[in-house]
Image (tube, rainbow, N blue to C red):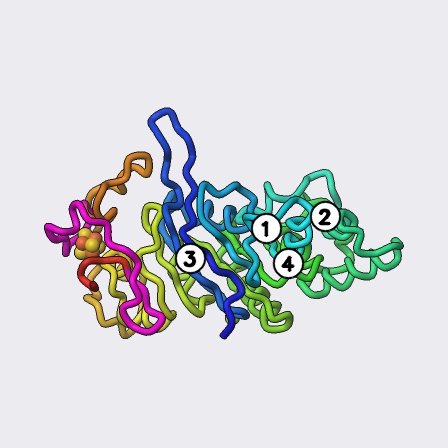
Amino acid sequence: SEKIVEVKNLKKYFQTKKGPLHAVDDINFFIKKGETLGLVGESGCGKSTAGRVLLRLLPATDGEVFFEGKNILKLNGRQMRKARRDMQIIFQDPYSSLNPRMSVEEVISEPLLINKIYKNKKDINKRVKELMDTVGLSQRLVNAYPHELDGGRRQRVGIARALALKPKFIVQDEPVSALDVSIQAQILNLMEDIQDEMGLTYLFISHDLSVVKHVSDRIAVMYLGKIVELADYNAIFKRPLHPYTQALLSAIPIPKVDVEQKMIILEGEVPSPVNPPAGCRFYGRCRHRMEICKDTNPTLTEVEKERFVSCHLHP
Ligand code: SF4
Ligand code: MG
């Protein structure tokens, strides 16, 4: 199916006193229209930064991001404001991402007002109502303030706001990590229903592979600023190829995995992203490391159809 998002050689470095921090270091991937691509990795691996750079919420250091064929990193302010309508984000923490002084109605209608979507108040109210229905929020809450809502309802407000401009693509950055486990499934199911109804495309970012597993069509695994493996959901879970993916998977209970069911304990620390190692970034922790891995960085390579891995074991 057609690619809606395409990321090419994307880099994001932050300047620090010790030198440039390689948060996102030359990543490449695409997202197909209507699918959910899961982006998974430990905290600090660069996945959230990648999501923000992709939407131009943070400036890229280098690279290209194509949305429906247009490089959005090259758009001017006016063009970008227009493109922004199609590309939204849902944040992890509905507690801090919503303005505490704005009512539910104000939060949801703000993007409609900023973009001058409707001319009169009546149409705005109607649309807010519609959005609240879509995300399963009772109309009684229209004048409530964020602190009066529980976490799940706050996240529903965030989702309604993200949907207000009828986007095509949504980055979900740890959308359920701050929520009670009992609420998580409700929100994930809601996002799935909305996706089917509106034909949305998602990038779903999470540190939690057991959550990513429930929602993703394909999965990209990130480690220290790089994508180390990217493949179909089934391929990743049945036969992970990268040693890091294998270790991640071994930590969650999954039936019928072809790797050792024993938990793989990763030894050593994640190296600093300020001075990343010259060779494979997983070298210090890898059970399969070889001489070549020390100085030669593997590149993400298509080893089977639509199956990408960055490891010298799979040249
Ligand atoms: Fe391990 Fe070498 Fe593969 Fe890196 S390239 S994951 S060190 S085997
Ligand atoms: Mg889906």
**What whole-number distance in Å separates the C-alpha atoms at marks 3 and 1?**
23 Å
**What whole-number distance in Å separates the C-alpha atoms at marks 4 and 1?**
26 Å
Residue 284 makes an appearance in the image: yes
How many numbered badges does the structure rendering display?
A: 4
Tell me which residue sits at (47%, 66%) in the image. 215
**What whole-number distance in Å separates the C-alpha atoms at marks 2 and 1?**
16 Å
Q: Position of residue 288 (x, y in %)?
A: 14, 56
Which of pointers 3 and 1 indicates the residue nearer the eye?
Answer: 3
Tell me which residue sits at (28%, 35%) in the image. 275
Question: Closer to the N terminus: mark 2 or mark 1?
Answer: 2
Residue that mark 3 sits on:
39
Q: Is mark 3 within 8 Å of ligand 2?
A: no
Residue that mark 2 sits on:
107
Find the magenta span and give its range: 284-309
**What whole-number distance in Å separates the C-alpha atoms at marks 3 and 4?**
20 Å
Residue 230 found in image quarter = bottom left
Kind of residue indicated by mark 4: Asp
Tell me: residue 101, above or below residue 29: above
Which of pointers 2 and 4 indicates the residue nearer the eye?
Answer: 4
